[in-house]
Image (cartoon, helix red, strand yellow):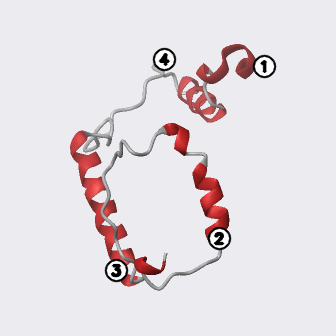
Amino acid sequence: MLKYVYGDDTVTLKTVYTWFKKFSYGSENVDDDHRSGRSITSRTGTNIDRVRELTVTLVKQLLAQHRVIELWHQLYSRDLSSRDFFLFPKLKVGLKGRRFADITHI
């Protein structure tokens, strides 16, 4: 019923149980307890950059391990407009299940 009335702003059942336990012991504060040594959030610009670098490194290692050729491409091409996207499913149907020895055979 609460979820129906308040939507995504409704607290979870786990939170309700946690608050009930705190209130039973006399606490009147519903804020999270401070945890020493931990940041409030781990999503920082530095961490995002580190994760991106790690992901790129891992993907490159996996591609090299499976001998997959990495093709360089621009992040955005003016030659490819949004109206061209309907072509991709048709291309995938024709190429499904086929394997190519190298880029020249495609």
Q: Amino acid at mark 3?
A: Ala
The reply to whether callout 2 and callout 1 are in contact (CB within 8 Å) is: no
Q: Amino acid at mark 1?
A: Met
Q: Earlier in the sequence, mark 3 or mark 2?
A: 3
Q: Earlier in the sequence, mark 3 or mark 1?
A: 1
Q: Quadrant of the N terminus?
A: top right
Horizontal placement of 53 versus 93: left or right?
Answer: left
Which of the two discs, 4 and 1, sits closer to the camera? 1
> For numbered disc 1, what is the local secondary structure?
loop
> For numbered disc 3, what is the local secondary structure?
helix
Residue that label 3 marks: 64
Q: Amino acid at mark 2?
A: Lys
Alpha carbon distance from label 3 to label 2: 23 Å
Which of the two discs, 3 and 2, sits closer to the camera? 2
Q: Residue furthest left?
A: 46
Q: Whole-percent x and y of residue 26?
A: 51, 22
Q: Earlier in the sequence, mark 4 or mark 2?
A: 4
Q: Amino acid at mark 4?
A: Glu
Residue that label 1 marks: 1
Label for residue 96? 2
